[in-house]
Image (cartoon, rainbow, N blue to C red):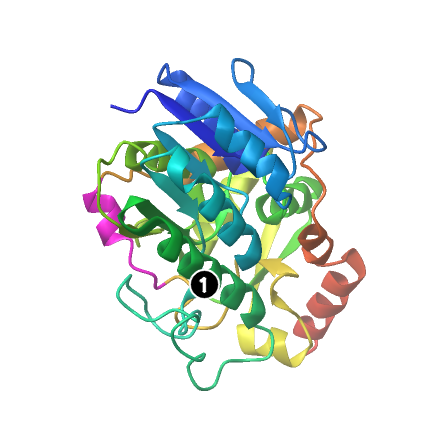
């Protein structure tokens, strides 16, 4: 039974959720980060250092061992390679949080854990220009390095979109702030489009569960069930939670693309590619992943936003959301079609 865990990161969003869940279980929790962003959970033993610095990692390894290491901050292949090589002897279970972007077919085709990643195959033909393949390549190569260094001690988690309090990309916060303003809100595409984001706290719970596995390499996609939500239920829940008088204007997706609207970024969670939300989460569900209702995720995120707290700065947040001027122009064009 796991009793001690090292969280690589641990000061904000998913990393802090993991540390908080481990503390809730009564585990001894160590967090390792630079101490420059976010805040470490009360009750965790904080070690300050830079994971890109081998001397800092060697010092960290000397403080161990831990029953498990959960890595929420390994964003590039070289960084993950360094950490997994240096810390391999400091644990018997290493849980690495990757992404569904590693698949050679995402977001164009339905995916299971058995399909090739971008470390093993080129992107499927027809990959559009607005899909950032380089991110998936880097994370896929990070997984490859972790496998080479850790073997059967490795668990890989591949979440899709992660939402919840402290979200730093800003997808759900943008929608909540926009809907709070009220008025006529541009809603993109098909209202019945199913979406399957996961709550950071549910990812954290599953990561801690898998940290207790005795042996064997594992890979899990982490997505909510297909019946979790639609774009319409998501937006209407945002209206309900904020108490807004907003009205939704559903605009055809092809029309929006012709008018220069950017899917996924300007209109978060809306994407026309058929594989975006067609990632199988069956294996994780059978292993115990439970996803709370999206209403809870939205309500808790709104409570966090309303408290005045802000997420740590992240460069991806700058590209999220539709400007007031562009939304008005798109709605005017839709009315005049």
Q: Residue furthest right?
A: 325
Query: Residue 212: x percent and y percent?
Result: 27, 31
Query: Residue 126: x percent and y percent?
Result: 47, 86
Q: Secondary structure at mark 1?
A: helix
**Residue at the spot of label 1:** 140
The reply to whether residue 311 is visible in this rendering is: yes
Q: Residue at x 60, y 43 (%)?
A: 54
Q: 295 and 8: which one is in front?
A: 8
Snapshot quadrant of residue 305: top right
Query: Residue 76: x percent and y percent?
Result: 56, 56
Does the magenta portion include 283?
yes
Quadrant housing the C terminus: bottom right
Q: Residue at x 30, y 24 (%)?
A: 2
Give the number of callouts: 1
Up-down: is 107 above or below 311?
below
Mark 1 crowdedness (10 Å alpha carbons): few <14, some 14-19, many ≥20: many
Q: Residue at x 37, y 41 (%)?
A: 94
Q: 270 and 201: which one is in front?
A: 201
Q: 100 and 306: which one is in front?
A: 100
Query: Residue 156: x percent and y percent?
Result: 36, 50
Q: Residue furthest bottom?
A: 125
Quadrant housing the N terminus: top left
Q: Which residues are magenta?
A: 278-287
Q: Residue at x 37, y 14 (%)?
A: 26
């Amino acid at each position: 039974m796991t009793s001690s865990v090292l969280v690589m990161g641990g000061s904000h969003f998913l990393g802090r959720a993991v540390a908080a869940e481990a503390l809730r279980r009564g585990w001894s929790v160590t967090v390792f980060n630079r101490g420059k962003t976010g805040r470490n959970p009360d009750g965790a033993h904080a070690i300050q250092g830079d994971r890109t610095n081998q001397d800092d990692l060697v010092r960290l390894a000397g403080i161990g061992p831990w029953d498990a290491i959960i890595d929420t901050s390994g964003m590039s292949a070289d960084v993950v390679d360094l950490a997994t090589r240096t810390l391999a002897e400091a644990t018997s279970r290493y849980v690495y949080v990757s992404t569904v972007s590693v698949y050679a077919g995402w977001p164009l085709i339905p995916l299971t854990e058995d399909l090739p990643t971008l470390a093993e195959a080129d992107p499927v033909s027809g990959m559009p220009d607005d899909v950032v393949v380089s991110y998936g390549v880097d994370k896929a190569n990070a997984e490859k390095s972790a496998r080479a260094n850790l073997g059967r001690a490795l668990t890989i988690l591949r979440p899709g979109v992660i939402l919840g309090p402290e979200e730093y990309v800003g997808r759900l916060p943008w929608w909540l702030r926009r809907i709070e303003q009220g008025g006529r809100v541009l809603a993109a595409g098909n209202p019945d489009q199913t979406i399957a984001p996961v709550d950071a706290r549910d990812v954290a719970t599953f990561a801690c569960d898998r940290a207790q596995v005795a042996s064997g390499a594992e890979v899990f996609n982490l997505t909510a069930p297909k019946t979790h939500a639609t774009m319409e239920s998501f937006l209407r829940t945002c209206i309900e939670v904020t108490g807004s008088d907003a009205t939704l204007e559903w605009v055809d997706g092809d029309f929006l693309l012709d008018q220069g609207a950017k899917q996924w970024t300007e209109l978060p969670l809306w994407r026309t590619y058929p594989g975006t939300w067609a990632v199988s989460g069956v294996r994780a569900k059978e292993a115990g992943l439970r996803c709370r209702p999206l209403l809870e995720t939205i309500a808790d995120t709104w409570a966090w936003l309303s408290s005045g707290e802000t997420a740590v700065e992240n460069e991806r947040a700058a590209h999220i959301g539709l400007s007031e001027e562009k939304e008005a122009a798109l709605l005017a064009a839709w009315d005049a079609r």
